[in-house]
Amino acid sequence: MLDCVELSTGPNPTHSVIWLHGLGADGHDFEPIVPELVRPNWPALRFVFPHAPIRPVTINGGMQMRAWYDITSLDFNLPREDAAGVEASCAEVEQLIARENARGIPSSRILLAGFSQGGAITLALGLRRAESLAGLIALSTYVPMAEQTLAQLSEAGRAMPIFMAHGSQDPVIPCTIGERSAQRLRNAGLDLQWRQYPMQHAVCLEEIRDLAQWMEQRVLGA
């Protein structure tokens, strides 16, 4: 089981948010977002922020860092994701979902979120799950191994609402890459909300407010 940072907004949480950080960060990265995101009228939520495993990353000269998978190229037109690493991370996040189920939180009350590389795992896992979650949150990211992932799109994955957001000035994952993924998901019939902000590879206050509005429908409606 992955080591995690956990934070609950009240006693006896009825909903969970599993939030995956980006390359080189850790589970503490998005802790500060919780008070900015959560609304007073929401039920108690448990936020689970796992730490990715430490592994060498090819594009960073083989440096060891927390990563959900290896990235072998900066070119988005080439196969750049370590497929075995993606699958291993998906399996590890599935264990976290199962633990929330064991704690009494059904999958229909679990949101899976991720930023950058974490968002890629969110989409790779969520789109192919046999059972729907409350929704997927994919920030500054894209669908990894797109052909393979979309070929394995499940009915449960097709039924899940998705919030995707991106910075128009992102130098790490160009906004056009995120838009391309969003359009492919829309073409596949998914309920996807897309937002774009004048920022780089980051999260901004306006984005948090838009995400909170989207989350409220999932949290209060489940």
Image (cartoon, rainbow, N blue to C red):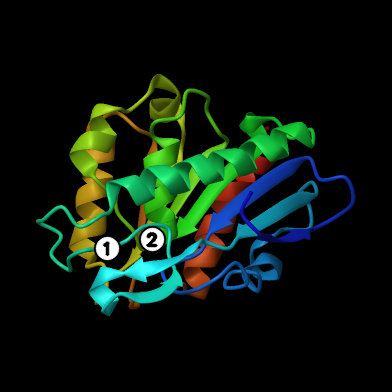
Instruction: Sort mark 2 into few (<14), some (14-19) or many (20+) by Cα contacts within 10 Å.
Output: many
Q: Is residue 20 above or below residue 216?
A: below
- Report x, y in % for residue 111: 58, 44
- Indicate the secondary structure of the residue bearing disc 2: helix
Is 97 placed left or right of 83 in the picture?
Answer: right
Q: Position of residue 156 (x, y in %)?
A: 45, 24
Residue extending farthest left: 77
> In the visual, does 120 lie left or right of 185?
right
Tell me the quarter of the picture where residue 7 sits. bottom right
Name which residue lies at 38% across and 27% down. 158
Depth check: 164 or 118 in front? 118
Q: Is residue 221 visible?
A: no
Quadrant housing the C terminus: top right
Q: Position of residue 173 (x, y in %)?
A: 26, 67
Q: Which residue is mark 2?
A: 117
Q: Amino acid at mark 1?
A: Ile
Say which residue appears at 37% left-offset and 57% top-offset.
Answer: 69
- Kindly indicate the quadrant of the structure image that contains residue 212: bottom right
Instruction: Residue at 62%, 60% (x, y): give it.
Output: 49
The reply to whether dot 1 and dot 2 touch (C-beta < 8 Å) is yes
Amino acid type at mark 2: Gln
The numbered disc on residue 142 is none
- Taking depth in this image into account, of 121 and 221 the one nearest to the observer is 121
Q: At 32% from the left edge and 28% from the top edge, which residue is drawn?
A: 153
Helix, strand or loop for disc 1: loop
Q: Which residue is mark 1?
A: 71
Determine if residue 160 is in view.
yes
Inter-mark Cα distance, 1 to 2 = 10 Å
- Callout in the foreground (1, 2): 1
